[in-house]
Amino acid sequence: MVSAGGLALLNLPNLITIARILLVPIMVWAIASQEMAIAFFLFLAAGLSDAVDGFLAKHFGMASELGAYLDPLADKVLIVSIYVSLGITEAIPRWLVILVVSRDFLIVGGIMLAWVLGNPLTIKPLMVSKLNTVAQILFAGFVLAALGFNLDADKVRLVLMALVAILTLLSVGFYLREWVRHMGVTTPSR
């Protein structure tokens, strides 16, 4: 195991997470090439690898500071890349892509702004955010499966899409509220 400033770099969960990040360009290629079944199986492999690296880190004492940063980064790279790819190929509506990607940019931008203003903010995932991530993953996986295996399930697709939109908006609202509280921003009285 290599260490850099106390970070365990080459433990098994971190290597699995890095492999998940390296799968993303292949998934983007598969979607762009209309190879949706391949994209679905790669997406499934990425999801399983996320579960495996988390299990190993928690149950075998392999958690590391690097892993704490890499894992959510891998999740975001995967989600954003899949949604953008599906939006470009018109497999999902662009407004949903914009909503999902903008939420992540707003959260990262808020963290950076708090840091620049000298009031660093540590984000803990909120329950609505965890539900949002699950809904985003389910929807993306469902779209890839439906396209890859010619499934006709428009009603399920619409329900999942609505769920993603609602949970994404709720997540933005809750994170904005937390950011405002943290920054001590108050509305001016009239």
Image (cartoon, rainbow, N blue to C red):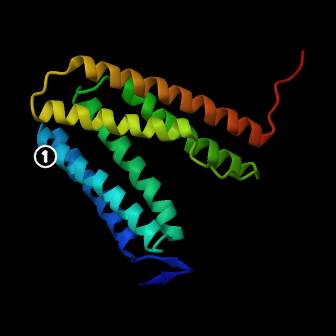
Residue under the image location 19 percent in, 40 percent down: 31
Report the residue at 50% width, 61% height from top. 69
Vertical placement of residue 149 versus 5, above or below:
above
**How many marks are shown on the rendered structure?**
1
Residue placed furthest toward the right = 190
Figure check: 171 above or below 42: above
**x and y percent of residue 71 in the render?**
44, 58
Tell me where residue 149 appears, x and y as whole percent: 10, 34
**Circle 1 residues within 10 Å: few <14, some 14–19, many ≥20:** some
Residue 105 percent coordinates (x, y):
51, 40
x and y percentages locating residue 187 in the rendered image: 82, 25
Left or right? Give the position of 77 relative to 35. Answer: right
Which residue was labeled with disc 1? 38
Q: Secondary structure at mark 1?
A: helix
Of the pair 132 and 5, the residue shown nearer to us: 132
Residue toward you, 63 or 71: 63
Q: Callout 1, which amino acid?
A: Ile
Residue located 14% across and 39% down the image: 36
**What is the quadrant of the N terminus in the image?**
bottom left
Q: Residue at x 59, y 42 (%)?
A: 109
Q: Is residue 174 above or below residue 56?
A: above
* Quadrant of image for the C terminus: top right
Image position of 131 (left or right of 24):
right
Q: Is residue 163 above or below residue 112?
A: above
